[in-house]
Image (tube, rainbow, N blue to C red):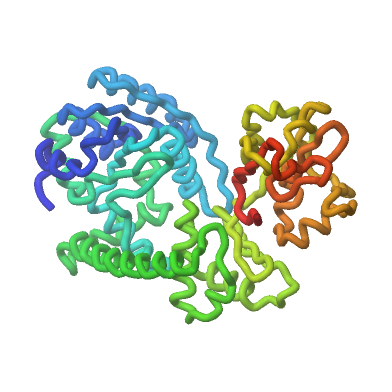
Amino acid sequence: MGRFGVEPLAAAIEPWRQAPRLWVAYSGGHDSTVLLHAVVALGLPVHALHVDHGLHPESERWAMHCRARCSMLGIPLRVERVTVRPRGEGLEAAAREARYGVFAAVLAPRECIATAHHADDQAETVLLRILRGTGIDGLAGMPAERVLGAGRLIRPLLGFRRADLAAYAARHELSWVDDPANRGDQHDRNFLRARIMPLLETRWPGLDQRLARLARHASSASILAECWARRQLTELGATHSLAVAALAGLGETPRLQLLRTWIRGQARRPPPERRLRRGLADLLGAACDRQPSLAWSDGCIRRYRGRLYLLPPCLPEPPAASLPWDIAQPLNVPNLGRLEARVGLGRGLRAQSLQQAPIEVRFRQGGERVQVRGQARALKRLLQERGVPPWLRTRLPLVYIGHDLAAVADLLIADPFRAGSTEPGLELRWHTALCGHVK
């Protein structure tokens, strides 16, 4: 750690210089003001992004300050207003989730967004997580970069102290807005910053460096555990589902690590360890005929026929109305998936049958029957026999030709509409947005 300036920042930001666009998360506060000023001085193609949480009467004035500052620096600014809805995790956490949601939505492929988190923030984060009883992943603190949306979130200031940034701000006579919430100590982080960290520093000088070293060691251990878990998941062929038997054969610690890695691999945040531990015991210990689940704010794991499936916290509802389908074009069903047809000889729907009547896509209402292997079978029974998880059965597109059920997604085709071995046909492909699709 050392003096902050344009040249030290250039070295810190070097790994991401080739990004087609660099965004700076610009709150208008002290730290992000320093970061934005220094990045502009580097001559990088920078855009600023300000998120107005609407939580303070002065938030509109802060946005105006950001606009004026960016105009003076000659860079574009995008302002996004969000509505913060706490869901039991507290206002601060809800605001952070809303803010990062905006970041993810804005980033195009390979773009980066830089936040102004510095060494003091890292030390506070690690100590706060220790006090909350974090695991090894939490001790690793904030990573210097991570995937976010289509791009990456980067933290180029982690190697610099708050005092280094303050000295830079003084040298360049920068101005910024001051959020009154940062002055009180009602929030845990502010309490640590104002009262606890200075006291600890008097007894253990260089506390921020000690905690940074702890974070590096924890990060190394976490990376090793993650690599082991990824290899195990590859060997198990676990992508959208995970065999219960594979987890049951492991001890509790590797079992939890495997599950956390599997969840993160599908771009979701794992639940807190206590919740994960308790939920996993239910998932593995329930009787074979039960369908237990583990739900948390970012996802839901369900068990079905000896496998675990990771789903969104709330499943989207299928459309209630029929959807006309021009089979020459893919049909996008919002939040559920995309249905398309490809030409194939002797496979799929008989091409001639498609000229007989209009084509529609519907979703199950109950009581549907389909002609397969010479018999009219209940669709519900057929889906059960094929092992389609219950949550998917009402979310599979049913292709109707006129009044007749011709196909169920890409799972089956009714006898009267099946292409013969030498006939031209159209093979259906259902690209589901949900996991658990059985072929």
Q: Position of residue 49 (x, y in %)?
A: 36, 30
Q: Is residue 62 visible?
A: yes
* Picture layout, residue 211 above or below residue 361: below
345 lies left or right of 94: right
Which quarter of the figure has residue 234? bottom left
Q: Nearer the viewer, residue 112 or 168?
A: 112
Instruction: Identify the residue at image location x=73%, y=42%.
Output: 397
Image quadrant occupied by the C terminus: bottom right
Residue 263 vertical placement versus 114 (above, below) = below
Can residue 134 be spotted in the picture?
A: no
Position of residue 144 measured from the top left corner of the image (x, y, whole percent): 27, 51
Q: Position of residue 305 (x, y in %)?
A: 68, 68
Q: Quadrant of residue 100?
A: top left
Q: Give the percent coordinates (x, y) of residue 90.
A: 52, 51
* Residue at image coords 62%, 35%: 343
Q: State the residue lying farthest toward the front.
A: 422
In the picture, measured across the screen, residue 256 lies left or right of residue 184, that is: right
Query: Which residue is pictured at 34% across the width and 21% down the height?
Result: 67
Left or right: residue 318 compared with residue 201: right
| In the depicted structure, whether residue 234 falls above or below residue 311 | below
Image point (39%, 25%), residue name: 78
